[in-house]
Image: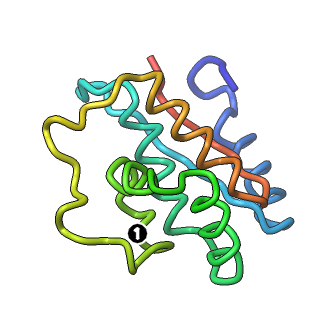
């Protein structure tokens, strides 16, 4: 959705959000910080919030699919999206925190997030505000 300031973009997104929520979907919203130096920080933040929104009944299903998708690499996902630990509390340990040497390029992050999305079976809407 693009348009001039005050043209009703947020109202449109809110109307669509109601419809997505009505069918049991998830709505991720994030407003970009122009001062942030990491170009993917807003997307990562939105996905991190999605992990906390995943409803109780969906959690075991999504956790199983993520384990199938990532296998032993699920630790990478947990380092990228710390809130994934809600789905895998047994796998979380202090050694899994993101370290300086774990910097990932944009392509790697994008593919990881796409793989994450394959596990979510409900509709997902992502609204990123102030992308410039």
Question: Which of the image's four quarters has the N terminus?
Answer: top right
Residue 15 at x, y percent in the picture: 78, 50
15 to 100, vertically: above or below: below
Looking at the picture, tell me which residue is in the foreground, 112 or 128: 112
> Disc 1 on helix, strand or loop?
helix
- From the viewer's perspective, tell me whether residue 120 is left or right of residue 41: right
Looking at the picture, tell me which residue is in the foreground, 124 or 118: 118
Question: What residue do we see at 70% from left, 57% from top?
Answer: 120
Question: What residue do we see at 43% from left, 42% from top?
Answer: 44
Residue 35 at x, y percent in the picture: 23, 26
* Label 1 neighbour load within 10 Å: few <14, some 14-19, many 20+: some
- From the viewer's perspective, tell me whether residue 66 is left or right of residue 82: right
47 to 3, vertically: above or below: below
- From the viewer's perspective, tell me whether residue 59 is left or right of residue 39: right
Splitting the image into 4 quarters, where does residue 74 fall?
A: bottom left
State how many labels appear. 1
Q: Residue furthest front?
A: 72
Question: Which of the image's four quarters has the C terminus?
Answer: top left
Residue 127 at x, y percent in the picture: 61, 40
The residue to which callout 1 is attached is 85
């Amino acid at each position: 959705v693009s348009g001039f300031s005050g043209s009703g973009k947020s109202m449109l997104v809110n109307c669509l959000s109601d419809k997505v929520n009505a069918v049991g979907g998830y709505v991720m919203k994030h407003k970009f910080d122009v001062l942030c130096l990491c170009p993917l920080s807003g997307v990562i933040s939105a996905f991190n919030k999605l992990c906390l929104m995943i409803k109780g009944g969906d959690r075991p299903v999504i956790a199983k699919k993520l384990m199938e998708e990532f296998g032993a690499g699920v630790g990478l996902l947990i380092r990228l999206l710390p809130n994934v630990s809600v789905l895998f509390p047994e796998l979380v340990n202090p050694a899994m925190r993101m370290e300086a040497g774990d910097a990932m390029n944009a392509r790697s992050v994008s593919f990881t997030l796409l793989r994450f999305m394959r596990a979510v079976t409900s509709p997902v809407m992502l609204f990123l505000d102030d992308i410039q």
